[in-house]
C-alpha cells in the first residue's frame, strides 16, 4: 500500500458468557468510549466515518444498522454496516482511509450471543434452504465433516486437535478478558460427548458476549495523535464455494487467498519467518491447525506436530493464540476477528501484561465467519 | 483532491417482477452477466465483488450474502456485503467506489439483488422486525405506519395536498412505461386513479406505494486507466456521500430528511458542486412512496422546503423539464426490490449520461446526474453523483 | 442499453403457477427466539411503565430531556445518568389511520398509530403509540392526549402497559 493506516485506539467490553446488566447498546457504548479515550478523539468532532459489522438474525432485528449510530457517536455521520466479520470491517476502514476521504474511522463489532435463545436454529438457517436445511441437522455437522476429511488427508490426529484446546484454554487463564480459561489435560480435552463426530464438544468454542471498537487513522493523523500506533501492513479477504456440494473440504483455499493478498501488501514473502505471533480462528480446535497451514505458517499436515511439540506455545517459536483464542475467550460470533486483532494490538504495544511476548513486531490476525461459510479475512499488523 | 478516479463502465439488470421464478442466486447472476457482457469483460477480469441486499428475513436465509455469493461471482474472490437498509442500492456503488479509490482493486463488480417474494404471506410482514424490539414491536407496527406518519407530518407542516403528491406517482408510472424492466409502468394513469385507490394507512393510498418485487442490478466499476481501455464512454463517480440519523426516530421532525441533506452535502463537496440546482441535470431520488420524491428533493437541496410539489406541478421535474426527476420511472413505476431498486437508479444515470436510455432519454445531453436512496427508520441517506467528466 | 438489448431476464410467476403444481416450492418456518437484555436505561423505562408512569432521561450538557431514556447522549456523546419522570400526557405530532395489519390483512376499524410528544420532554421528543377512544375525524396534529393504562395488576413492564392514548377532553365528539 502506498500509505499506511494505523490503529490508534482500542476499547472493549466483556467478554463473559452473560451480560444481563447491560443492553447491546450499552455494551457497545462501553467499548466505544474506551476506544475514543484511548485514541484521544471526540467521535462527534474527529471521527469521519464509522463501520460496524452485524447480522440481522443474530441481533433479532431487521436492518440492524438502524440501531448502531447513537452509542458509537455516529449520529448524522457516515455510518455503514458490513455483513461480515470484524476484520472485514477493519479492511473497510482501511479502504476508506486509503481513498483519502476519511482520516479517522471507527470500527465496531459485538456479540450478545446470550440473548439468542435459539442460536443453533438460526445458524442452521444459513444452510441452503432447499438442498441442505431440510435434512434438519445442527450446523456443526459441516465442521464435523470438514474435520474428518482434514484429518484423513493430512494425517493430523485427534490428539493434536486436543492439544490446541489444552493450549488455548490454558493461555486464557492469563487473560483477564477471557471467559473460558481452564487447566485441562489432554484426556479432559478429548473427553466429553461428541458434537458432530469426530468433533467433540470440548473442541468447539462456547459463546461469549462482548464488544470491541477500534479507531483507525491515516499515517499523518496517527503520527500526530498516537505515541504507539499499530500499523496495518496488509489486509485481505476472500470467499470460497458457497455450497457444501461444491467445496474443497481439506484446505480452505479462500484463507490462503486472503493471506496472499495481505502478505503482498505487507511485502512478506515467507510468512513463517516474518510473522512473530498469530491470532487466528479456532472456533473448532482443528480449525487452528487448518488455518495455520492455509496461512502459510507451515506446510499442510505439519500444524498438528507443531502444536504437540510446543512450537505454538507462548514461549515457542511461533506463538499462536496467546490470548486463548475463541476456545479460551469465547466465540464472539462476527466480533471474533476484532477480538483477535485486539490481542495483536496489545502485544504490539507492549500492553499484554502477563501474556506479553518478547520482541513482538509483526502479528498475523485471521478470522473465519463460521459454519457453513467459506468466508475469511486476514490482517498483518506491526509496531 | 488527489483521489483516485473511478468510473462505471458497464451495467445490467433483470426485469423487476412481483414474483420471479429465478432464485436469488440466479437473479444476481443474470444481472452480473449482463453487466459484464455490456463492457465485454469476464468474471476473470473482476478483482472484487460488492453485494448489496436488504433484510435477510425476506429470503429466510441467515447470512444471506454468503449464500448469494456464488450467484454474484464471489467464488475465490474478495467479497463483501454492505447493508444500510433501503439505502443499500446507492450505497453498494459507494462501497465499490472505495474498493477502487483505495488503490486496492482496479475492477470491481457491484451487485444488488432482492428476492422479497419468498416471505410468506407477504413481504411487508418482515418489516415488523425493523422496529425496536423492546419499545415498539409489541405495538405490532406496520411499515405503512412509519411512512404514513411521515407523509402526514410533511403534508401538515407545509400545507401539501394529496393531489400535489399524487402527481409524482403519475409522472413516475408514466415514465416507467418506457422502461423495459418495469413492473408498474402505465402510460394512462391519472391523479384521480391514485386518489381513488384504496386507503391503506391514511394518508397513504395503494397507488402511492411502490410494490414488493424481485429483481437484480449490477454495475462494473473500474479505475481510470482500465476504464479508458474498456469503454469510450466511462461515466465517472464524481461524488459520494452517506449519513445515518439517530435510531430514536420519534425524537426527530419527520417533515424534513436532514440525513439526506448531510449525505448530499458530503457528495456535493467531493464533486466540487456549489450550485446543485444548476449543476445536476438528472435526479433519481428514492421514491418508495410518492411523497418521498418530494421529501428527498428538498433534503437534496434541489428544492426549498415545502416547495418540491410546486416543481412537480409546474412540470419542472418531467422528463423534458428543466430538472428531470426519476426519468427511469422510479420505484413507483419500475418496482421496488429494495437494494436492486436503488442500484437501478444509478444504472439509469449510467445509461442516460451515455445517451443509451432509449425512449426514456432525457434531452439536452445531460452531463451530470445524482442518485439517492433512503433507508432504515427514516434514517439513512446515500448519494452518488455521476458525470461524463472525471 | 435499451437499444442494444431487447430481452431482459426475469420470469414472472403467478399464483396459479403454484396451485397448478407447475412450480415446486418448500415451506419452512424459522424458530427465532430472543431474550434481549434491556440494560440500564430501557430496564428502568420498563420498570417505570410497570409502576404506571413514563420515564425520560436528561443530558446536562445539551440541556435536553429525551424519551426513552438512554445512557449516552447521541449528540454530545456524554454519559446520561439522570432519569426524569414525565407526565403521561402529550401532543400528537403526527398520526395515521391504518386499515391494514402488519401482515397485510384488511381491518374495518382503523388502528391509529401516532407519534406523541410527551410533556416535559424537549420539543419533538416523542414515542410511537396508538390512539383510542377517539373518532377518526377528531384526530388532528396538535391534539392533546393522555395515556390509558392497564390496571396495575396486569402491567408487565412493557410498552403495552399503556393501552393507548386518548384525547384529554374525554374522547369522541
Image (cartoon, rainbow, N blue to C red):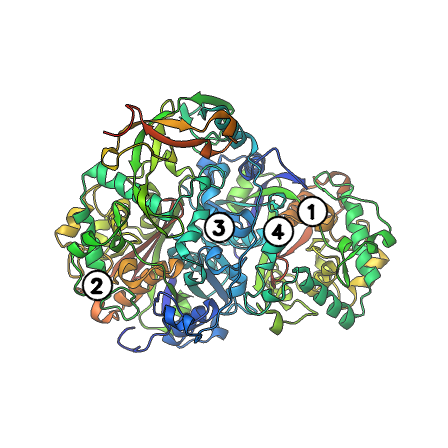
Name the residue rendered at 18%, 57% in the picture: B193
Q: Nearer the viewer, mark 2 or mark 3?
A: 2
Name the subunit of mark 1: A
Using the numbered discs, state the Cα–Cα distance from disc 1 to disc 2 in whole angstroms. 55 Å
- Element at badge 1? loop
Using the numbered discs, state the Cα–Cα distance from disc 4 to disc 1 in whole angstroms. 15 Å
Horizontal side, residue B349 vs residue B162: left or right: right
**Closer to the N terminus: mark 3 or mark 1?**
3
Count residues near mark 4 (Cα–Cα under 10 Å), then give few for <14, some for 14-19, many for 20+: some
Q: Is residue A90 visible?
A: yes
* Residue occupied by mark 1: A330
Q: Nearer the viewer, residue C21 or A89?
A: C21
Residue A185 image point, x, y percent: 87, 50
Name the subunit of mark 4: A
Using the numbered discs, state the Cα–Cα distance from disc 4 to disc 3 in whole angstroms. 21 Å
As drawn, A272 above or below C59: below
As drawn, B383 above or below A160: above
Label drawn at residue A119: 4
Count residues near mark 3 (Cα–Cα under 10 Å), then give few for <14, some for 14-19, many for 20+: many
Count residues near mark 1 (Cα–Cα under 10 Å), then give few for <14, some for 14-19, many for 20+: many
Using the numbered discs, state the Cα–Cα distance from disc 2 to disc 4 in whole angstroms. 47 Å
* Residue occupied by mark 3: A81
Name the residue rendered at 30%, 50% in the picture: B272
* Residue occupied by mark 2: B175
Residue C100 image point, x, y percent: 34, 49
Q: Nearer the viewer, residue B292 or C23?
A: C23
Are the residues under marks 3 and 1 on the same chain? yes
Are the residues under marks 2 and 3 on the same chain? no
Horizontal side, residue C42 vs residue B361: left or right: right
User: Do residues under tags 2 and 3 come within 8 Å of each other at their CB atoms?
Assistant: no
Amino acid at each position: 500500500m502506498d500509505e499506511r493506516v494505523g490503529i490508534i485506539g482500542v476499547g472493549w467490553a466483556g467478554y463473559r458468557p452473560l451480560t444481563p446488566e447491560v443492553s447491546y447498546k450499552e455494551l457497545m457504548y462501553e467499548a466505544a468510549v474506551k476506544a475514543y479515550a484511548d485514541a484521544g478523539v471526540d467521535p462527534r468532532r474527529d471521527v469521519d466515518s464509522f463501520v460496524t459489522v452485524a447480522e440481522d438474525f443474530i441481533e433479532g432485528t431487521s436492518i440492524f444498522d438502524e440501531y448502531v449510530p447513537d452509542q458509537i457517536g455516529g449520529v448524522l455521520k457516515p455510518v455503514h454496516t458490513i455483513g461480515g466479520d470484524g476484520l472485514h470491517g477493519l479492511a473497510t476502514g482501511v479502504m476508506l482511509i486509503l481513498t483519502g476521504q476519511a482520516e479517522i474511522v471507527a470500527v465496531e463489532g459485538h456479540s450478545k450471543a446470550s440473548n439468542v435463545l435459539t442460536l443453533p436454529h438460526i445458524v442452521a438457517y444459513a444452510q441452503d434452504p432447499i438442498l441442505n436445511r431440510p435434512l434438519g441437522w445442527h450446523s456443526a455437522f459441516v465442521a464435523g465433516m470438514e474435520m474428518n476429511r482434514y484429518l484423513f488427508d493430512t494425517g493430523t490426529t485427534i490428539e493434536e486437535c486436543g492439544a490446541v484446546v489444552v493450549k488455548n484454554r490454558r493461555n486464557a487463564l492469563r487473560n483477564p478478558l477471557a471467559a473460558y480459561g481452564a487447566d485441562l489435560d489432554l484426556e479432559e480435552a478429548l473427553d466429553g460427548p461428541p458434537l458432530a463426530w469426530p468433533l467433540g464438544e470440548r473442541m468447539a468454542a462456547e459463546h461469549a458476549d462482548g464488544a470491541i471498537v477500534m479507531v483507525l487513522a491515516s499515517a499523518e493523523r496517527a503520527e500526530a495523535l498516537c505515541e504507539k500506533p499499530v500499523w496495518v501492513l496488509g489486509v485481505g479477504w476472500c470467499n470460497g464455494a458457497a455450497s457444501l456440494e461444491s467445496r474443497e473440504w481439506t484446505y480452505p483455499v479462500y484463507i490462503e487467498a486472503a493471506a496472499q493478498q495481505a502478505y503482498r501488501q505487507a511485502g512478506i514473502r515467507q510468512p513463517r519467518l516474518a510473522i512473530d505471533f498469530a491470532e487466528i480462528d479456532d472456533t473448532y480446535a482443528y480449525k487452528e491447525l487448518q488455518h495455520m497451514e492455509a496461512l502459510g505458517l507451515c506446510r499442510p499436515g505439519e500444524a498438528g506436530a507443531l502444536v504437540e511439540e510446543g512450537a505454538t506455545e507462548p514461549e515457542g517459536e511461533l506463538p499462536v493464540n496467546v490470548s486463548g483464542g475463541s476456545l479460551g475467550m469465547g466465540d464472539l460470533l462476527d466480533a471474533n476477528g476484532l477480538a483477535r486483532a485486539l490481542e495483536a494490538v496489545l502485544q504490539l504495544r507492549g500492553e499484554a501484561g502477563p501474556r506479553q511476548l518478547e520482541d513482538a513486531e509483526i502479528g498475523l490476525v485471521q478470522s473465519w465467519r463460521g459454519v457453513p461459510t467459506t468466508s475469511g479475512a486476514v490482517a498483518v499488523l506491526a509496531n | 483532491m488527489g483521489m483516485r478516479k473511478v468510473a462505471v463502465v458497464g451495467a445490467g439488470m433483470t426485469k423487476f417482477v412481483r414474483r420471479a421464478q429465478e432464485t436469488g442466486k440466479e437473479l444476481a447472476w443474470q444481472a452480473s452477466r449482463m453487466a459484464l457482457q455490456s463492457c465485454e469483460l469476464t468474471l476473470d477480469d473482476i478483482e472484487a465483488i460488492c453485494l448489496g441486499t436488504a433484510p435477510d428475513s425476506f429470503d429466510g436465509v441467515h447470512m444471506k450474502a454468503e449464500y448469494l455469493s456464488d450467484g454474484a461471482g464471489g467464488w475465490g474472490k474478495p467479497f463483501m456485503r454492505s447493508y444500510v437498509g433501503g439505502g443499500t442500492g446507492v450505497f453498494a456503488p459507494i462501497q465499490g467506489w472505495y474498493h477502487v479509490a483505495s488503490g486496492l482493486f482496479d475492477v470491481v463488480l457491484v451487485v444488488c439483488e432482492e428476492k422479497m417474494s419468498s416471505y410468506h404471506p407477504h413481504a411487508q410482514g418482515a418489516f415488523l422486525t425493523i422496529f425496536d424490539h423492546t419499545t415498539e414491536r409489541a405495538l405490532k407496527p406496520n411499515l405503512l405506519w412509519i411512512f404514513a406518519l411521515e407523509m402526514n407530518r410533511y403534508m401538515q407542516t407545509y400545507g401539501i395536498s394529496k393531489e400535489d403528491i399524487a402527481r409524482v406517482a403519475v409522472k413516475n408510472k408514466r415514465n416507467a412505461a418506457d422502461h423495459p424492466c418495469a413492473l408498474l409502468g402505465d402510460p394512462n394513469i391519472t391523479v384521480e386513479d391514485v386518489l381513488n385507490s384504496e386507503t391503506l394507512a391514511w394518508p397513504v393510498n395503494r397507488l402511492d406505494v411502490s410494490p414488493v418485487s424481485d429483481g437484480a442490478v449490477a454495475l462494473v466499476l473500474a479505475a481510470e486507466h482500465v476504464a479508458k481501455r474498456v469503454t469510450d464512454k466511462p461515466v465517472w463517480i464524481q461524488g459520494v456521500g452517506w449519513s445515518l440519523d439517530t435510531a430514536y426516530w420519534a425524537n426527530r421532525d419527520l417533515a424534513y430528511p436532514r440525513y439526506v441533506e448531510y449525505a448530499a452535502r458530503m457528495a456535493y463537496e467531493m464533486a466540487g458542486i456549489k450550485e446543485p440546482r444548476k449543476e445536476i441535470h438528472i435526479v433519481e431520488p428514492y421514491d418508495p412512496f410518492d411523497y418521498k420524491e418530494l421529501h428527498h428533493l428538498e433534503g437534496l437541496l434541489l428544492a426549498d422546503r415545502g416547495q418540491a410539489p410546486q416543481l412537480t406541478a409546474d412540470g419542472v421535474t418531467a422528463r423534458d423539464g428543466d430538472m428531470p426527476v426519476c426519468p427511469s420511472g422510479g420505484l413507483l413505476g419500475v418496482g421496488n426490490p429494495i437494494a436492486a431498486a436503488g442500484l437501478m437508479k444509478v444504472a439509469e444515470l449510467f445509461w442516460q449520461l451515455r445517451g443509451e436510455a432509449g425512449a426514456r432519454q432525457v434531452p439536452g445531453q445531460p452531463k451530470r446526474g445524482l442518485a439517492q436512496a433512503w433507508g432504515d427508520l427514516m434514517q439513512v441517506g446515500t448519494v452518488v453523483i455521476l458525470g461524463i467528466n472525471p | 442499453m435499451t437499444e442494444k438489448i431487447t430481452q431482459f431476464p426475469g420470469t414472472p410467476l403467478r399464483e396459479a403457477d403454484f396451485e397448478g403444481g407447475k412450480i415446486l416450492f418448500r415451506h419452512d418456518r424459522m424458530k427465532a427466539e430472543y431474550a434481549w437484555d434491556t440494560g440500564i436505561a430501557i430496564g428502568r423505562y420498563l420498570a417505570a411503565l410497570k409502576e404506571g408512569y413514563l420515564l425520560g432521561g436528561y443530558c446536562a450538557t445539551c440541556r435536553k430531556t429525551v424519551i426513552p431514556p438512554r445512557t449516552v447522549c447521541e449528540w454530545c456523546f456524554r454519559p446520561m445518568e439522570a432519569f426524569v419522570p414525565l407526565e403521561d400526557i402529550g401532543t400528537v405530532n403526527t398520526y395515521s389511520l391504518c386499515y391494514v395489519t402488519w401482515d397485510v390483512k384488511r381491518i374495518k376499524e382503523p388502528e391509529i398509530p401516532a407519534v406523541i410528544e410527551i410533556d416535559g420532554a424537549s420539543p419533538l421528543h416523542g414515542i410511537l403509540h396508538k390512539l383510542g377512544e377517539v373518532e377518526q375525524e377528531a384526530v388532528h396534529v396538535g391534539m392533546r392526549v393522555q395515556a390509558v393504562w392497564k390496571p396495575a395488576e396486569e402491567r408487565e413492564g412493557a410498552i403495552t402497559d399503556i393501552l393507548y392514548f386518548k384525547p384529554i377532553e374525554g374522547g369522541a365528539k
